[in-house]
Amino acid sequence: MSETGIGASVKRLEDYRFLTGRGTYTDDINQPGQTHAYILRSPHAHATINSIDTSAAAAAPGVVAIFTGADMEVGSLPCGWQIHNKDGSPMAEPGHPPLAQGKVRHVGDQVAVVIAETLAQARSAAELIEVDYSELPAVVDMNKALAGGTLVHDDVADNLCYDWELGDEGEVDKAIAGAHHVTEIDIVNNRLIPNAMEPRAAIGSFDRATGEYTLYTTSQNPHVIRLLMGAFVLQIPEHKLRIVAPDVGGGFGSKIYHYAEEAIVTWAAPKVGRPIKWTADRSESFITDAHGRDHITNVKLALDESGKFLALKVNTKANMGAYLSTFATCVPTYLYATLLAGVYTTPVIYAGVKAIFTNTTPVDAYRGAGRPEASYLIERVVDRAAREMGIPQDEIRRKNFIPRDAFPYQTPVALEYDSGDYEATLNSAMKNADVDGFAARKAASEAKGKLRGLGYSTYVEACGIAPSAVVGSLGARAGLFESANVRVNPTGSVTIFTGSHSHGQGHETTFAQLVSETLGLPLDQVEISHGDTNKVAFGMGTYGSRSLAVGGEAMMKAMNKIIDKSKKIAAHVLEAAEADIEFKDGKFTVAGTDKEMTFGEVALTAYVPHNFPHDTLEPGLEEQAFYDPMNFTYPGGCHIVEVEVDPDTGVVKVDRVTASDDVGRVINPMIVAGQTHGGLAQGIGQALLEGCIYDDNGQLLTGSYMDYTMPRADDLPNFSTSNEVTLCAHNSLGVKGVGETGAIGSPPAVINAIVDALSGLGVTDISMPATPQKVWQAIQGAKAAAE
Amino acid sequence: MYDFNYHKPGSLADAASAIAGAEDGKLVAGGMTLIPTMKQRLAAPSDVVDLGGIGDLVGITVGGGTVTIGAMTTHGAVAASADVKGAIPALAELADNIGDPQVRNRGTIGGSIANNDPAADYPAALVALGATVVTNKRELSAEDFFTGLFDTALDEDEIISSIKFPVPEKAAYVKFANPASRYAMVGVFVAKGSDGVRVAVTGAGDDGVFRVTEMESALAGNFSPDAVSGISVSPDGLNSDIHASAEYRAHLISVMAKRAVAAAG
Amino acid sequence: MSQIHVTTKINGDTTEYLCDPEETLLDVLRDRLALTGAKEGCGTGDCGACSVTVDGRLVCSCLTLGAEADGCEIDTIEGMADGEKLHPLQQKFLEHAALQCGICTPGILVAAKSLLEKNPSPTEEEARYWLAGNLCRCTGYDKIIRAVMDAAEEMRRAS
C-alpha cells in the first residue's frame, strides 16, 4: 500500500484552510455593490393573505426594492420524484411558490422580500409591511390531517399526498394469521431538525454585459439547483446560469433541496441591478430547513416456534409538511419500504405508506433518509420479539441473518443485495463491546443504584444512490449517475472536476488518493475541483452516501480513459505497438525493454504534439466519463450500545458505543472513522436528545438551541468503531458508502439498551427521544402497573 | 438590533445619571440575556448603559463571616476565586456550572440576579444563604429582592453594586440542567447557617425562586439526606413545559434536595 | 446614532475601527475587518462558532458589542498559527482529522486553546465539559477530544 493511495490514512488536504480560518463559505463572500435581503415570513401556520401593503416599508431608509408573491409569478419549486397511488394514479402534487400566492401554509412561509443597503435596514423595513391575514385552523397531527376538515391545499382531499404500497398484503396477512407468535409495536420515528452548523445562505447576481446569472449558495448539489431553478422555476437557460457552492458547512441532506431563497435572490438580482445576499439566522434555519423523519408506524412481525421470521407487515404515515420538498416523496417509499427485509431472510413483507400534508415545515431526507426509519422499526420489533420469546438478542439475529454465501440475495421488497457478512460484523461488535463483561458491569452499576442495559442493532442500508434505470422505474424524474472530468495539465499535474460536492466528507483527500493510486502521482500534483457549474460540466451532487461509489467510479472510468490515451501517445513516441505499452508506478514502458516514458513526459507530449498522426491521435490529455451504477450498494453492520440509567431522575448515560460496519473497501480509514462518528452522534441525538415539537396551532416549540437539544461534547462518550470488509460486487473499487451508516444503525441500539436496562421493572417500550422525563415516566408507569 | 445610544460610564454615579436621563434605558452587565434579546428585536432600548467600565463593581472580598461579590464579577471569577472556594465552596461550584465557558466569562452575578430568570442558578444561592443585595440606593434581603418572574424590587434607575453572602456552616447546590439550554430545570440550594437551614429552589417555580419550608424544618432537626427523602413537594405552582411536567419537577426537587444535603455533608 | 471609535489590539496588531452601537464584535470582525474565521452559527451565544478571546477570556463575539472591545486585546483564529507554523492544537486537529466541514473549527480551536491556557492537563471529562459551549454537527466530538488531549500532552512536553 502506498502512503498516498487506497487504504492510507492521508491527512486531509482541505484542512489547512479550515484550521486557519481561511475557508470560504457563502456568508464569507461579499460582492461589490452588494445589497441585503430579508425575508418577511408568515407568523401563522395557516392563513389566507387578503392584502399586503408595502408602501411604508418602501419609503424606509436604505430600501432598494420590495417584492411579494404578486410580483414574483414564476414556476413552482419542483419535486423530483413522482410516486403513484395503489390504484396507479399519480400522487397529489400541489404547487410550491417561492413567495406565497394568497395563502401561507406553515410558520416561516415566505411572504415578501425586502432588499436594502444593509440587513438591519431590510429587517426594519420588513416590520413596516402590513399583511392582512385571515387565520385558518392549522392541521399539525397526521391522523387529524387524514380525517379531512382543514385542508393544507384546497385541492388535496384529506391532505393525502399518496397512498402507496409494496408487497402482497393478502399473502402477508395469511402468514401472520398462521404464525406461532406475532409481535406488534406502534412506533414513532421522531421529527428532527437537521441543524447544519452553517445556516443556509445565497448571493444572487446578474451581469448585464453577458446576460449571465450567478448564484452562490450553500448546496450539496449545485448542478441540480441549476437544473431545477433554471428549467422549472425561473426559466433561465443553463448556459446563462452559474451556480457556485463554495465551502459548505455541513448539509446532512438539508442542503440538497432547491429552496425559495435561492430563486428569490437570483430572480431579483437583475431587477435591482446589484448583487443580493441573504443569510438565514438560526431561527430561520429552524423553521425553513427541511426537517427529517416524522413517521408513525404500526409493525407486526410473525415468527415460528424457533424464532424464525415468517412475515413483516408495516403501515406507516409519513409527514410531508406543507409542501413537497425536492426529494420528500421518495423517502418514505423507495428509501424506506425497500429496506424492510433488513439483514434477515423474512420471506414475505408488506408495507403500506400514506404521505400526508400538514401545516408544518416541509420534511425531506435527513442523514439516512428512510433507512433509519426502516432499521429502527425492524430492530425494535426484533428486540421485542426476542424478549417475548425468551431468545437471546444475538441468537435471534443469527437465526434470521441472510447467510454470507447467499449473495446476491433477492429480498421480497425489490432490492438485490450484492454482498455482505452480517455474522462477521455482529461477532466483531460483540467482541469489541466486551459483551462477555457486561454482567459484571451491570452488577457494578446496580451496586451504585443504577440500571445498566445493552442494546443491539444489526442493519443494512442501500446507498450509492443510484442506478438510473432503477430509480427511474421508481419514480425519479432524473437519472442519478455522476460525472468526472480528468484534465492532465501539460506539466503532468492533474485536475479532477467532479459533480460530487464536499461539505465535510473530505473529498479533496479521498479522491486525490484515487488519483495517486491510479496514476501514480504525488498528492501535491492533484487538484480536486468541485462546486462550480462553470468548471464542472455536470453532476448530481452528494447525498445518499454516493460520492465515492458513484462519483469515485466516474473518476476511475475517466482515469482509465486517460491511461488508454496515454498508452497511445507512449506507443507513438516510443515507436512500439500500443498493446505492448504497460503502465505502472507512473511510468509507461514497452514490455520487455527498458524504453519508458514518465506520466509527465506523456502529458507534455500530449500538449506539444509535433508529429502526432492526424487520423488516429488527437492532441491534449483530458477525458470525461459518466458512471451509472448497476445497483445500489449495501453497507451493513452491527451497533451495540451500553447505557446506564439513573432510576431516580431518568437520566440515561451512554457509556459505550461500539460500531462494526462493512462499508466495502476503505480508501481512507481516518476519514471513514470520522464519518461513522458523526453518524453515530446524530443517531444517538435522535434516540436521546432531539425532538421537534409543534403546538396544535403549528407554532414550533423547539425553535432554538434553548429548546432543541443538540448533542454536545459532554453528552457523548468516545466511540469504538471498526470495519469488516466485503467488497461491493458491481463497482471497480469495491466501495459501498459510509456517510449514513452511523445514523441508520445506532438509534435502535440506544433504545434497545434502555429497554434492556428497564426490563427488570417491566418496561417494554420507550419512544425517541428518550429524555429523562420520558424515562422517569416509563419507570413510574411500570411501577404503578406492577402494584 | 435597533439603533441605540451607547454609554460606558466610569462610576456608579455616572451610570445612575445616564440611566435616569435615558428615555428608555437599559443597563448591560455581561449582556448574556440583554444582547440576544436585542438581537432578536424583542427589546429596543433607546440607550444602553454598559457597566463594564466601572472598576469598583468588580471583585471579591471575604471578612467578618461575609463574602462580598461585586455586581460585575463574572461567574468565571467567582468559580475561580480561592476566597469563595474557601468560604462558600458551594457558591464557587454553582458559578462553575452556569452555562458554558463563554457565558461564565461574560455573565455577571449582578446581571443574573437583576434579570431574575426563573431558571437561573444564583437566585437559589442568594435566598438559601440569606444574602443581602447592595444597590446604589439601599440594601435588600434576597427574599425582598426577588419579586417574581423576571421581576425584582429594583427601581428603574437603581443599580446593584454588590451582593453580601453570610458564610454558612455547610451548603451545597445540586442542579438538574435542562438538556437543551443547560439552565436549571430544577436547582436546589441547601444551606445551614446561624439562622438555621434554608432550602431554596430555582428552575421549578412558576414565580421564580422559592423556599421549601417543610424540608427546612426537617433538616433543622436532622441534617441528613434521609430527613428530606420522604418529603414530597406539590406540583401546584411548578412550571410545566416540553422538557418537564410539574410532577416531574416536583419529584426532581426531592431528589436534588437529598443529593444537595448529602453533598453538604 | 453616531459611530463609535474603538481602538483595540487584534492578534497583536493595534487596530482602530468605527462601528455603530448595535454592531457586535463578530459583525465588526467579519464585515469591517474581513476576519471571517469566526462564524455566526446561531447569533445567540449557544453554538460557540463565533468564539474569540477578549483580554485572554473566551467569549462569544456575537454577544459582545463592538464598542465594548475598546482598549481590549482580541485574539481570533487568524492569529493562532505562527506564520506558516500551525499551533500544536491546529497540528493535532490535522493529524486526527478532528474536523469535517470546518465551520465550527475556528471556534473550537479558540475554545480549546483557552482551556489549555487555563488547565494544561485537563481530563477528558474536563475537556468535554469545557467544549460543551461549542456545537459540532459533523464529528461527534470523538476526534476533537482526542486531538485536544494529544495537543495538551505535546504542549506539556514542550514547555
Image (cartoon, helix red, strand yellow):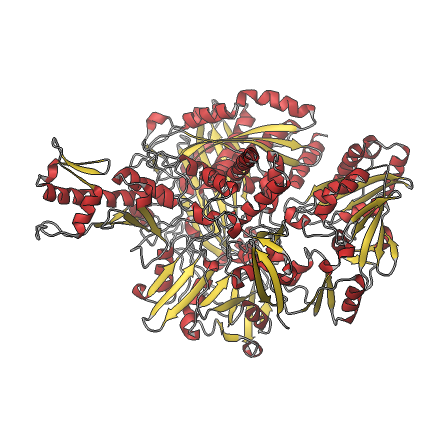
The count of marks equals 0
Which image quadrant: the N terminus of chain A? top left
Is residue A318 left or right of A735 when viewed as pictured? right
Is residue B198 left or right of A265 when viewed as pictured? right
Identified at 33% across, 40% down, the residue is: A513
The one nearer the camera, C8 or A192, is C8
Is residue C120 left or right of A169 when viewed as pictured? right
The one nearer the camera, A561 or B252, is A561
The one nearer the camera, A562 or B42, is A562
Q: Can residue A703 be seen in this view?
A: no
Above or below, comparing residue B265 to residue B199 in the picture: above
Identified at 51% across, 28% down, the residue is: A181
Q: Quadrant of residue A388?
A: top right
Report x, y in % for residue A63: 53, 75
Report x, y in % for residue A781: 68, 36
Above or below, comparing residue A330 to residue A5 in the picture: below
Which image quadrant: the C terminus of chain A? top right
The one nearer the camera, A167 or A100, is A100
Report x, y in % for residue A712: 58, 43
Report x, y in % for residue A715: 60, 39
Q: Can residue A7 be seen in this view?
A: yes
